[in-house]
Image: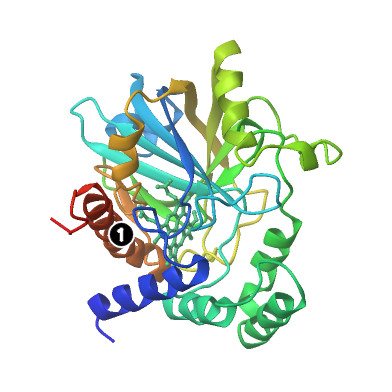
Amino acid sequence: MTSDSFTRTMIDAMEGLSGPQPGYRRVHARGLILAGSFTPSGEAARFTTAPHLQRDPVSTITRFSHTSGDPRAVDGTPTVRGMAVKFFTPTRAESDIVTVNVPAFVASTPPDFLELVNRLTGLPVQGPERREAIGAFVAAHPESVQAFKFAGQVAIPASYATSRYWATHAFVWIDAAGRRRFVRYRWEPAAGVRTADLDAVPGWPATHLTDELVERLHREPVRFTLRVQFAEPGDPVTDSTQIWPDDREEITAGTLEIAAPAQDQAYWSATTFDPTLVGDGIGLSDDPVLLVRGLLYDESRSRRLREARALESPRGEAR
Ligand code: HEM
């Protein structure tokens, strides 16, 4: 399969998971976009020339999202959630970090993920059929066991502001001398990790977590620190089903401060947060899932923008 036809097949398959949702992202359909800034600690400057990770604060746009492709999916369920951050360098170039609240991804290659999506299509979101399908997938792909354990343990957070988020893939930091080091990113919530009060969850409105975030921001900014883990020789750098040991060297690259909902939700929603958009001083690892994500997200974006234009057109035709 060529990369173009794989991209189309993969996005077609993802559309099957939640049914047609014209104008929305094929997954992570419902989200909230927030404006803020990132203040580097200065620690990263020794390891990367990335302009947004030196010393001066830069502006950011963050999108928190529910993982489902169905924009009506409710917040009071234990599911994976996303936090995507776009940094604007001093010259307005962009660099993205796209994370989820689990440390590992469930498939080590794009065709494996396609297989998983096909196995799950048409099954209820919870229940024995789904567990059986995942069991059959894991039996064929034992490297995915740990990631499914993480996904199975994922709790409903008290707030988007009280969860950890991981980028799952390895990236490469390049310093001024051209030295390359493999790194992994994690956002640590300044408010601490807190899960929801399960007695209160049944009373939550569908959009409780985004409502809570807006309310919280009226009181105070939401902060996360960017923790960066360095690989040691032999650590897996091309397979995001595998995590690195906790004792690897880490630094704090800086602090994200989220101030308020972004003024123009529609404008930022129309863009993509693309993990392959890294900018100067940062490289991509050879993780095949990472490498394909830019193409996939572009395909999802062009479909949703085409659909949104058609919905806006008085005659319902694509323009
Ligand atoms: C082959 C594997 C994957 C496929 C097919 C896939 C597919 C997609 C698609 C189609 C979108 C919507 C893009 C758009 O319309 O803008 C998306 C968004 C997203 N994906 Fe993935 N993805 C994959 C792997 C991952 C991994 C490993 C992560 C872990 C960090 C991840 C986290 C996210 C997040 C957080 C978003 C929402 C970004 C936003 O708010 O705009 N995905 N994904």
Query: Taking 198 as reference, is 299 left or right?
Result: left
Count how many numbered circles sit on residues in the image.
1
Is residue 318 shown above or below 272?
Answer: below
Q: Is residue 319 left or right of residue 292?
A: left
Q: Quadrant of the N terminus?
A: bottom left
Q: Residue furthest left?
A: 319
* Image quadrant in which the C terminus is located: bottom left
Q: Name the foreground residue: 277 vs 77.
A: 77
Q: Is residue 150 visible?
A: yes
Q: Please tell me which residue is depicted at 58% across the width and 52% down the height of the picture.
A: 73
Q: Which residue, as the protein is rendered here, is positioned at the far top?
A: 219
Residue 117: x and y in percent read: 52, 75
Which quadrant does ligand 1 occupy? bottom left
> Which residue is rendered at x = 33% and y = 19% of the image?
56
Residue 131 appears at what percent x and percent y? 73, 76
Q: Is residue 301 above or below residue 50?
A: below
Query: At 35% across and 37% down in the image, what residue appears?
Result: 86
Q: Is residue 175 visible?
A: no
**Residue 221: image x %, image y %?**
54, 17
Q: Quadrant of residue 271?
A: top left
Residue occupying image coordinates x 51% and y 61%: 233
Q: Which image quadrant is residue 304 in?
A: bottom left
> How is colour applied across the structure in the image?
rainbow
The three-letter code of the residue at mark 1 reads Gly
Which type of secondary structure does the marked residue at label 1 adopt?
A: helix
Using a 10 Å C-alpha cutoff, classify the residue at mark 1 as few (fewer than 14 neighbours), some (14 to 19) or many (20 or more). some
Residue 23 or 173: which is nearer the viewer? 23
For this orientation, the residue located farthest to the right is: 199
Where is residue 232 shown, x and y percent of the image?
A: 54, 56
Seen in the image, is 22 located left or right of residue 209?
Answer: left
Residue ID for mark 1: 294
